[in-house]
Image (cartoon, rainbow, N blue to C red):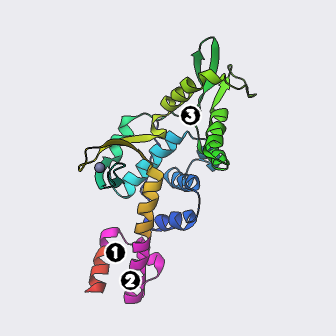
Amino acid sequence: MTQEFVQALSAAAMLEVWEEGAGRHPIDRALLFLQHACPEQPFEALCEWPVGRRDAHVLALRRHTIGDRIEAYAECPACRSGVEFELSCATLLASAVPVEAAIWTTVEQGSRIYELRGPNSRDLALAAEAADQEQARRTILSRCIRRGVGRDEVVAWVESDEDVLVERLGKLDPLAEVLIDLRCDLCGQPWQMLFDIVTFFWNELQTRSRRLLQEVDLLARTYGWTEGEVLRLSEPRRRMYVEMALA
Ligand SMILES: [Zn+2]
């Protein structure tokens, strides 16, 4: 994959994303991350990136901003005890090659020919407006599966082909759905958990933004610096001043 060069979010950019993303849908937050990860790309193009490519760039942004190691927590579905686990952004990125762009892949099923492409943020946004999960699923399938080759008009798939087509669709863009194998230490229950980097990074960003604002508040009151001046300090320097102000 031609991964764009992704830079870390600066302290100021982190607050910008946090402010703009508050109260927004996770799809909007994903696109906000993506805009910061790939500032050269027009927004319209980013909306059409397959979800796996989008999430690969969010992973890269998280890796450069916070670090490679992800420390996460899940609840055992059998006994409800907490399970802590670690992931690495680099390992996740290396485990699957995300598809480059929304390229239609031809699939033959019986005597019928279909074309499939991995869902993008626009498909997900439309699905999010659906009345229920089934309608959401159908919305995505109807946009990402078409019968025949190179046709733009919608020709529905044959119902009995649906399971095979859905399975193929999942394999087209492996990073679109990251499943982690977990096992409970207490009761031994194995299960698979869906890991969503956008939600995970968003939660981390919220915690960091709050702490950053507390640091700005403390340093502004102690030294009379402006918000901009505090945010321009490197993290180790800011930490040091915070320690001194609290001493
Ligand atoms: Zn358990």
Q: Earlier in the sequence, mark 3 or mark 2?
A: 3
Q: Nearer the viewer, residue 223 or 92?
A: 92
Magenta-drawn segment: 210-237
In x, y percent, where is residue 114? 63, 21
- Three-letter amino acid code at the position of disc 1: Arg
Which of the two discs, 3 and 2, sits closer to the camera?
A: 3
Q: Earlier in the sequence, mark 1 or mark 3?
A: 3
- Residue 16 visible in the displayed image: yes
Q: Quadrant of the N terminus?
A: top left
38, above or below 14, in the image = above
> Where does label 3 land, which residue?
118
- Three-letter amino acid code at the position of disc 2: Leu
Mark 1 nearby-residue class (10 Å; few <14, some 14–19, many ≥20): some
> Where does label 2 land, which residue?
219
110, above or below 192, in the image = above
- Residue 181 visible in the displayed image: no
User: Disc 3 on helix, strand or loop?
Assistant: loop
Query: Separation of disc 3 and disc 2 at Cα?
Result: 48 Å
> Where does label 1 land, which residue?
238
> Which residue is located at x 38 percent, y 78 percent?
215
In x, y percent, where is residue 157? 67, 24
Q: Quadrant of the C terminus?
A: bottom left
Mark 3 nearby-residue class (10 Å; few <14, some 14–19, many ≥20): many
Which of the two discs, 1 and 3, sits closer to the camera?
A: 3
- Whether 212 is among the magenta residues is yes
Q: Are marks 1 and 2 in contact (CB under 8 Å)?
A: yes
